[in-house]
Image: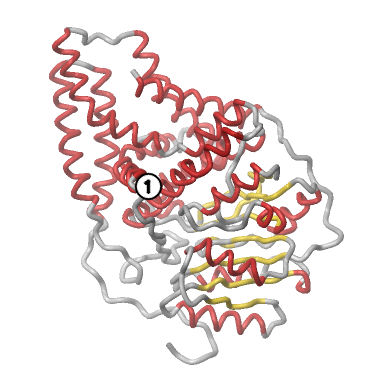
Amino acid sequence: MVGCAIFLCIGLNLLYLTYLAAAKPRKHPVPAPVTDHPRVTVQLPIFNELYVVDRLVQAACDIDWPKDRLEIQVLDDSTDETRFISGRLVKKYAGQGIDITHIRREDRIGFKAGALEKGLAEAKGDFIAIFDADFIPPRNFLRETVPYFANEKVGFVQARWGHLNQSYSLFTELQAVIIDAHFLVDQVARNRGGFFMNFNGTAGVWRRKAIEDAGGWEHDTLAEDLDLSYRAQLRGWEAVYLPDLIAYAELPVAVTAYRRQQRRWAAGSFACALKLLPRVFCAPLPGLVKFEAALHLLGYMSHVCLLVLFFLQPVLMYYAQRTGVTAPNPVLWLLTSLPALAPGVYLLYSQWRATGKLVKRLPYIMLASVLGAGIMLIVAGAVLRVLLAKQLTFERTPKFGIANTSDSWDGKRYVIGPDAAILVEMLCAVFSLATVTYAAALHIWGSLLFAVYFLVGLSFVLATSLGQLTPPAVPRPLPSVSGGRDL
């Protein structure tokens, strides 16, 4: 019953957020055009990004802002040839009159947070824009975001993520569906509802004073973006979210890379929950704001609950058979059906907002809704590591410069080998198949539906992973930039 109550709470909140996103009016007025251009520093944190650093730096240098008011920092922690490529790029654009610097560190203390901290100490700007390596900064980005800082209470402005390679594969399509839901429901609803929202680590602008007032970048979680945004809002700074301003990025094409990403996000989010929730609960905030903050920071716990339910299913069915209670209980039916339907409504609305189409997107929506079952093992493992106070290591998500369906990542560097999680997923898939068979034999149709849900999610991730296990190819030639010595 406790598990059902948790899922009911999560499901109802998804419906509530969807309602707010659809019905709540825009919170922030349209700002007046900028006449006095403030100085802005654009930070580009990179680590071993052979295939995307060129397009990133080029797009940053093309941002429409007065050259004498724009500074670009390439925060390069790379240990491979990327450091030479980025160095050449900086030299090239500096020769064109752009204020661009190449900042390197002797170590990687603090990972991305440490690089941002180092850059901030040398930055000239009063506002700090941040773009990760897989993004392409829009040319009009600063002209669309900086005007909102006319309100002295605004600490950061966040744009929506777009997808360079959404149609590359079924796997990237499903990722796009889930990311769209976050940016077109969660972020919209939290911002308009007056709840805490998070800076997404990239495609956003910070007021420098807000970063410093909140205590700066801290290294004790893998989610430095979530951590700072909550600390800033606890200090009274406000956030602005712009769903119509889109910064396009490359989605992971390999399941192993996606596993790394989800493991890092889950561990970082849960570490932030342990660190920040006591401060949130002690702050003079409305109860609903605290409740939403708890659900937000503990969002990945839904996957842990899902895993517990997955293993408990046969036990519950056995108990139902022994007691003779195999017909659905109306109360339990309500507790389980609402959480099952809520993600569908949540994803349907976001896809309608993103594409204006529903019928063509239905297959992706249905399959994306079961993807959570496919990654529940990864997420639960990350949460467990945080609970056991294990050392958290930053695992980068490799990018291969994939922007079109004709692009290929075969033979490129950074390809991650088979993940040991595949073996565990195989065992869980067998367990899931046995659960489906058991539920069908007992004619417990409600349990059968849930068992099929787990089986489809696990099978999809497992099949995609196995399909990507190809023999290593001969590495292709590395990208180069004109000028400078050869690598």
- Screen quadrant of the C terminus: bottom left
Seen at 23% across and 63% down, the residue is 470
Instruction: Kindly indicate the quadrant of the structure image that contains residue 301.
Output: top left
Residue 128 position, x and y percent, is 67, 61
- Screen quadrant of the N terminus: top left
Furthest residue in direction bottom, as rendered: 485
Q: Nearer the viewer, residue 248 or 105?
A: 105
Badge 1 crowding class, 10 Å Cα cut-off, few under 14, some 14 to 19, many 20 or more, is some
Residue 353 visible in the shown view: no
Furthest residue in direction right, as rendered: 35
Residue 261 position, x and y percent, is 40, 53
Q: Which residue is labeled 1 in the image?
A: 386
As drawn, is 231 to the left or to the right of 270? right
Picture layout, residue 475 above or below residue 110: below
* SS state under label 1: helix
Picture layout, residue 263 above or below residue 400: above
Instruction: Kindly indicate the quadrant of the structure image that contains residue 289.
Output: top right
Seen at 38% across and 19% down, the residue is 337
Q: Nearer the viewer, residue 273 or 421?
A: 273
Disc 1 residue type? Val
Q: Nearer the viewer, residue 192 or 143?
A: 192
- Tell me how the rendering is colored: secondary structure
As drawn, is 464 to the left or to the right of 198? left
As drawn, is 276 to the left or to the right of 27? left
Residue 383 position, x and y percent, is 36, 44
Residue 221 visible in the shown view: yes
